[in-house]
Image (spheres, rainbow, N blue to C red):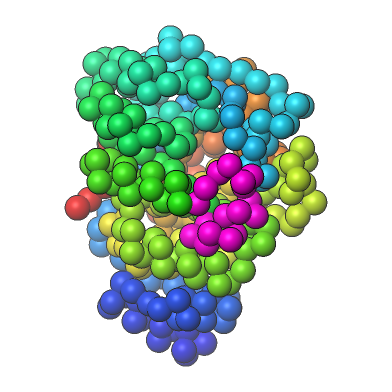
Amino acid sequence: MNDVRSLLDALVERHSLTLEEYKFLIENRDEQSAEYAANKAVKIRKAVFGNSVYIRGLIEIGNICKNDCYYCGIRRSNTACDRYRLSDDDILKCCDEGYAIGFRTFVMQGGEDAYFSADKICDIVSRIKSKYPDCAVTLSLGEYLREDYVSMFNAGADRYLLRHETANNDHYGKLHPEKMLFDNRIRCLYDLKDIGFQTGCGFMVGSPYQTTDTLSEDLKFIEEFKPAMCGIGPFIPHKDTPFRDYPAGSAELTCFLLSIIRIMHPRILLPATTALGTIDPVGREKGIKSGANVVMPNLSPISARNKYQLYDNKLSTGAESAQNLMDLKERLKNIGYEIVVSRGDALK
């Protein structure tokens, strides 16, 4: 316990640990050390952001995907998936509704669908930014060529979220088919950051074949890459994937890692993810109390939400729904936090 505390204190001072030290933290944590980490993380987060929590309006633009990731419910091979694709006007209507409610960031997320070419995405982004110039647009649409990312940035996109999934090449190969290359995923992330996007990475906690060694590599990658934002959440299996029988990840470990990442990068934008809220009824609140400062309620059309099932039982109603923002505000107020109407940009 004392050694874990000493390492956490060292991370506060240095914002860096060795791979072996990260591994030691993960393997030797207990309830008391996790609470110690959370207290450190919350103190740091409050010093930078106060009690503010930023909201993002999530628009799931389609579940058609060319990829066949072994963990994902919208993978190409899942013939049971009820496919859909939002029109440009559908997406704009989501933004209209979101803006009226109080959202100032819209997140367009979807499968890797050739229909959503770079030109198509640029046109949609331009329309959103023209109508709502005071809003930020985040894209989470997978891998493109560098020149495509440049076009999206020039069209007005502010942020791009691309989970690295794992910082270990061998582990990446166990989660994805051969055509999907770890090196290309990392290339995309560095291209995005170099172009000027507020760039986000992230990974699943407890994914199949994950070890404390690969988790340590994830933390070291995040430390060195210095993303503007980082999305982590527990792995949750989907019944129509090859990983259907694998156990889900842990909310407890996810929250501990949120604290580590907050201590590592005090100014990072850190969501309490939908997966965390799915696996634990108060997972969102636990994430905030571990150092997170972003939540992403769902703005997608009601008719589409149940079709975007990346994993089983994914939440899209209740406090996860943008239309129930008052419920979310009340739940966060009860633990001492306040949702703010703001773009919530990354701090330099």
State the image coordinates of residue 274 (x, y, percent, origin top left).
Answer: 55, 43
The outermost residue toward the top is 89
Q: In this view, does 190 lie above or below 205?
A: above
Q: Which of 108 and 316 is in front in this view?
A: 108
State the image coordinates of residue 66 (x, y, percent, origin top left).
Answer: 59, 29
Q: Please indicate, yes or no, whether residue 139 appears anywhere in the rendered image.
A: yes
Task: Answer whether residue 169 is magenta in the image.
Answer: yes
Q: Which residue appears at 67% of the width and 44% of the height?
A: 70
Q: In this view, does 279 lie above or below 149?
A: below
State the image coordinates of residue 345 (x, y, percent, origin top left).
Answer: 26, 42
Q: Which residue appears at 42% of the width and 21% of the height?
A: 117
Q: Which of 14 and 216 is in front in this view?
A: 216
The outermost residue toward the left is 348
State the image coordinates of residue 294 (x, y, percent, origin top left).
Answer: 40, 46
The outermost residue toward the front is 179
Task: Answer whether residue 9 is magenta in the image.
Answer: no
Which portion, as a residue range, is magenta? 166-182
Q: Is residue 343 above or below residue 207?
A: above
The outermost residue toward the bottom is 2
Q: In this view, does 252 lie above or below 86?
A: below
Q: Is residue 248 left or right of residue 22?
A: right
Q: Is residue 277 left or right of residue 134?
A: right
Q: Which residue appears at 52% of the width and 30% of the height?
A: 112
Q: Please indicate, yes or no, whether residue 57 appears anywhere in the rendered image.
A: no
Q: In this view, does 105 lie to the left or right of 206?
A: left
Residue 83 sits in which quadrant? top right
Q: Which residue appears at 55% of the width and 72% of the height?
A: 213
